[in-house]
Image (cartoon, grey):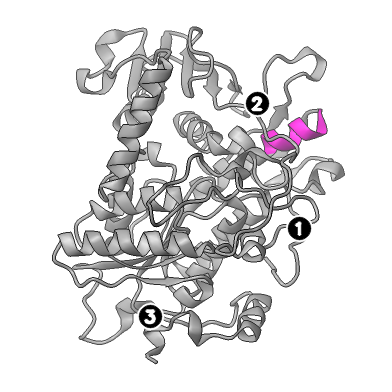
């Protein structure tokens, strides 16, 4: 068997466990671009493999499918049915583009990373897998597009950043609002002083994670649950289908919800990270805090504090609260300056000075949709995804930027340093919330100030389950 096309049968369970225990630190795999004349250089083609083939993986494939010069050749997932679905979707797309029809599938991502014909890896796994997936991909010589938030914990964010820098890999974080016109314009207006000095920011993202309370269910035969759990400790939670939404191949039936692992403390970081990685990210970019972060976080309810509050050394306060009074659950941001305000959400940009907003970026102010409208919108999004091209998340420009940087070796619009600072900010919000008191943080050295309890919090770092190591 050709090692470059190695399949699941090419590695034993013993070999795999040994590889995981070593953390792949011994790998010296070279990127495909260094091989001989038979290889098409990245300037002409970028070959991509996927780790994570669920809803988000399919969405990201739709985005990459619209980028010229991209070839997708492999997908990895711990659910064999999602492997099959991904393979069919990719090979249908390949056929439509006149490409050779072949998409290999894997259960263990380490096998995919052994391939020397792949230039870049797209990661759409649950957050607790982002660190190991990204670190190992960088160590194997691949550039990485990793979904947001960059990490599950503070230490993971800093480790990913260090490895990406040491291996000189291009890493783009999937905070795709960075590539969207309305958010880019909002950042520009704030930074050029269009509404004066910024005094406060409202950033609506949603609730923090709740304790895990789903009943236990039997693990389906198509899911490697132990591999899904990975470095987490499974004595704190158990399998439930909401964590890994099931699908059907024949007849085709897609996931009916997003993976609920996002909403539980044991497996995710709630809306604080899921949407914070979007909205807190844009707010920090606008106030010039990329690569930095807050100096103090005060949780909701502490001494009458109405909202989760982030304080910055420049004097600005950002609160997690509605940015539109009549749409309290709509995610978005409002900047308050000494000379006006700016509010921005997906597909909408408004300002107290209307002449500052280009007509093509203004969009429609969010409104409360009826259940029928929401259902119709969801069906349109699903149909667009099933068509195999494009994505209902404004992602294609973001993927284009990543692929351009893979070719040029320039820094992408949402680099690893930005993803790390945003992920850390989200973790700080949840740490303060769970401790039910303020935490003080030094963003320059990325350390808590005289706070052992926060230093030892699970979202600062937790000991990985054996045999996984960070």
- 121 and 221: which one is in front? 221
Determine which residue is flagged by label 1. Answer: 233
Q: Residue at x 37, y 60 (%)?
A: 86
Residue at 77% over, 48% down = 458
Kindly identify which residue carries mark 2: 311
Foreground residue, 467 or 119?
Answer: 467
Mark 1 vs mark 2, CA separation in Å:
33 Å
Q: Tell me the quadrant of the picture where the N terminus can be found.
A: bottom left
Q: Quick one: which residue is furthest to the left in this view? A: 98
The label nearer to you, 1 versus 3, is: 1
Tell me if 77 is positioned left or right of 116 in this view. Answer: right
For residue 37, side relative to residue 456 (left or right): left
Q: Position of residue 184 (x, y in %)?
A: 34, 31
Q: Earlier in the sequence, mark 3 or mark 2?
A: 3
Magenta range is 428-436
**Quadrant in which residue 379 is drawn:** top left
Is 293 a magenta residue? no
Q: Which residue is mark 3?
A: 116
Q: CA distance from mark 1 to mark 3?
A: 33 Å
- Single out the residue that lies furthest toward the front: 251
Q: Secondary structure at mark 1?
A: loop
């Amino acid at each position: 068997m050709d090692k470059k096309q190695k399949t699941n049968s090419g590695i034993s369970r013993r070999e795999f466990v040994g590889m995981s225990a070593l953390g792949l630190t011994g790998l010296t795999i070279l990127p495909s671009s260094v091989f001989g004349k038979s290889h098409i250089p990245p300037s002409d083609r970028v070959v991509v493999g996927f780790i994570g083939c669920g809803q988000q993986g399919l969405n990201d494939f739709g985005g990459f499918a619209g980028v010229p010069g991209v070839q997708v050749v492999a997908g990895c997932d711990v659910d064999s049915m999602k492997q099959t679905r991904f393979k069919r979707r990719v090979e249908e797309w390949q056929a439509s583009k006149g490409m050779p029809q072949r998409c290999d599938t894997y259960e263990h991502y380490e096998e995919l990373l052994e391939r020397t014909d792949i230039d870049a890896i797209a990661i759409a796994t649950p957050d607790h897998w982002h660190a190991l997936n990204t670190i190992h991909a960088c160590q194997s010589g691949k550039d990485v597009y990793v979904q947001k938030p960059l990490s599950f914990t503070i230490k993971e964010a800093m480790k990913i950043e260090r490895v990406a820098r040491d291996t000189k890999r291009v890493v783009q974080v999937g905070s795709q609002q960075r590539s969207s016109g309305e958010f880019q314009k909002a950042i520009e207006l704030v930074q050029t002083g269009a509404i004066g000095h910024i005094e406060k920011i409202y950033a609506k993202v949603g609730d923090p994670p709740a304790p895990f309370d789903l009943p236990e269910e039997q693990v389906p035969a198509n899911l490697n649950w132990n591999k899904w759990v990975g470095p987490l400790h499974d004595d704190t939670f158990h399998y439930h289908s909401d964590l890994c939404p099931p699908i059907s191949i024949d007849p085709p039936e897609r996931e009916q919800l997003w993976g609920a692992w996002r909403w539980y403390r044991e497996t995710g970081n709630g809306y604080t990270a899921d949407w914070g990685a979007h909205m807190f990210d844009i707010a920090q970019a606008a106030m010039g805090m990329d690569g930095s972060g807050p100096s103090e976080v005060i949780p909701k309810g502490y001494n009458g504090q109405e909202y989760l509050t982030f304080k910055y050394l420049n004097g600005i306060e950002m609160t997690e609260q509605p940015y539109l009074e009549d749409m309290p659950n709509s995610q978005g941001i409002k900047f308050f300056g000494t000379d006006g305000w700016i509010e921005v959400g997906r597909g909408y940009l408004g300002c107290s000075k209307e002449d500052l907003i280009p007509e093509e970026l203004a969009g429609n102010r969010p409104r409360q949709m009826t259940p029928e409208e929401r259902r119709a919108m969801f069906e349109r999004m699903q149909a667009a995804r099933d068509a195999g091209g494009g994505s209902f998340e404004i992602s294609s420009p973001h993927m284009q930027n990543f692929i351009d940087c893979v070719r040029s070796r320039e820094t992408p619009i949402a680099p690893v340093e930005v993803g790390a600072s945003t992920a850390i900010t989200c973790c700080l919000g949840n740490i303060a919330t769970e401790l039910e008191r303020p935490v003080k943080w030094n963003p320059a050295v990325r350390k808590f100030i005289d706070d052992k309890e926060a230093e030892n919090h699970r979202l600062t770092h937790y000991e990985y389950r054996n045999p996984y190591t960070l």
